Amino acid sequence: MITAQLLAALVITVAPAGLWLHRMLPGQLSPQAPSARWLLLGGYSILLGMLLTSLLMRLLSLLGIPFSLYSLAGAALILCVAAWLLPPAARGQQSAATAAAEVEPGRWQRYVVVLCLALLALRLLSLGLEVSTRPVTSWDAKQHWAKQARVFFELRSVVPYVSLQEWLQLGGQGVYTNMHPDYPITTPLLQAWTAVAIGHWHASLVNLPWLLTWLATGMVFYGQARLAGAGTALAIGATYMLLSMPYLNIHVALAGYADLLLGCCYLAAVAALYNWSVSREHWQLLLALSCGAACILIKNEGFYWALSLLPGILLVLIGFRKGVIWLAALALLVVATIWLIPEDMVIAGHSLASIDIRYRPQSWLPLYLSFLVHDNWHFLAYLALAALAAVPFCARQALPLAAVMVSALLLYMTLYLFTSNAVGAEHFTSLNRVALQLMPAAGFFTLAVFATLVQRDLRK
């Protein structure tokens, strides 16, 4: 019975986004890679479906309708009917990048594909066992997300959360409190939705959205990699490398943090932006903007990752030379704004007074150890730096994507070298969790540069 309820909840979650995307995406993305469309459709449907479900739960709560399988199924049905009434998109043309990369795979390449698929299936099974049997153990979940999710589940509604001081002043009447009442509530809503689906609070099964996020990350990565020109063996090999990174897997097995979902969302935005910059297909830009904006729904820092997409979009729209000038002007404007705004002004959950801007050189060693010594990301940091160095010389097609990654990296370095968050680097408490939000996108950037170099060699 629980399995049937979970399957029903999965359909309710994925179907509306899936139908809308099915009508929006061209009927043929690549004749020689037909699976790319379905994997792309599946990955984005899972990701956007989960985010859409959280928004529907907020809407139902606003209307005074309790959460239930029936109420959310009704809302999902309305969205599905609306999508079905839309005219389908035209059949797409195969991109030049994909056409250039497609060659008949050799025997060893087929072995690579089979091996990677088998390893991914085993990894999915082992992670599924971890998620479905391990109770809530992660710090964020125990201190914040899971408690809030339990309240939403028990009341079948979104309720206001306030600071501890305000809660004391109001005597707890009609309000609730936790350590971070200003955090976005998407993560606890997804946990609450899982509990609503099975009809009771289950300390393990409420973490199933993390397994879905792992699956969506791989599907989005592979689908967009194929459209970016990577061959089957290269795309599936890179997908396995991404999904087997130690720190990423820890966040699935010890589910409860919101960083993995944000990392998947940012990857989906960055990958779509890159393929839009090459093909100029409007549906890719729409995916990039939608997923970029959705980052804000997951964590406060998602606001800054969404902003990091702007340099890439600007370079595509007005060209490299004009874009560099505009970006320099925007950088000066940002510095001037930081200098002039009041210290108590709150942006994305933080103020200048709270972050205490000053240089903190003690963060350099933890940054070096985390990315280049510790076994958190395998060799991805080395590969990403090599790809970044190759862009100006032999992979200029990836310049807009490189601008996005450099912007995100500068924001990340600023966080730990110039703000009070440096304590998270010194003690290795938040350093890797925030990095997880960026590393899947860094993996796609590395693959895009490598695929560009492969295509160039094939054309010679």
Image (cartoon, rainbow, N blue to C red):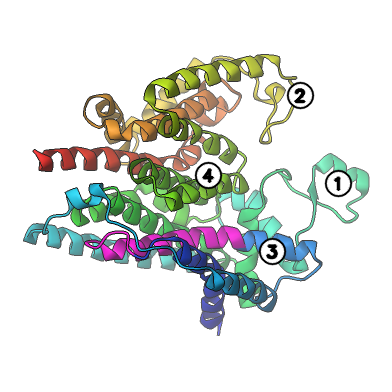
Mark nearer the N terminus (2 vs 3): 3
Mark nearer the N terminus (1 vs 4): 1
- Give the mark toward the camera: 1 or 3: 3
In percent of width and height, residue 301 lies at 58, 38
Mark nearer the N terminus (2 vs 4): 4
Q: Which residue is mark 2?
A: 344
Q: Which mark is residue 284?
A: none
Q: Which amino acid, mark 3?
A: Met
Q: Which residue is mark 3?
A: 57
Q: Which mark is residue 167?
A: 1
- Give the mark toward the camera: 3 or 4: 4
In percent of width and height, residue 212 lies at 47, 63
Image quarter of residue 418: top right
State the SS at label 3. helix
Q: Which residue is mark 4?
A: 292
Q: Which amino acid, mark 1?
A: Trp
User: What distance separates the C-alpha of mark 2 from that of mark 4?
Assistant: 27 Å
Apparent side of residue 296 relative to residue 323 in the rendered image (left or right) = right
Is 206 situated above or below 459?
Answer: below
User: What distance separates the C-alpha of mark 1 from that of mark 3?
Assistant: 24 Å
The question of residue 34 being in magenta is answered with yes
User: What secondary structure is the magenta-colored segment mainly?
Assistant: helix
Please say if the residues under marks 3 and 4 sit with CB atoms less than 8 Å apart.
no
Residue under the image location 24 percent in, 65 percent down: 118
Please say if the residues under marks 1 and 3 sit with CB atoms less than 8 Å apart.
no
Residue under the image location 29 percent in, 41 percent down: 448
Mark 2 Cα shell of 10 Å, populated few (<14), some (14-19), many (≥20):
few
State the SS at label 2. loop
Q: Which amino acid, mark 4?
A: Gly
Please say if the residues under marks 2 and 4 sit with CB atoms less than 8 Å apart.
no
User: What distance separates the C-alpha of mark 2 from that of mark 3?
Assistant: 32 Å
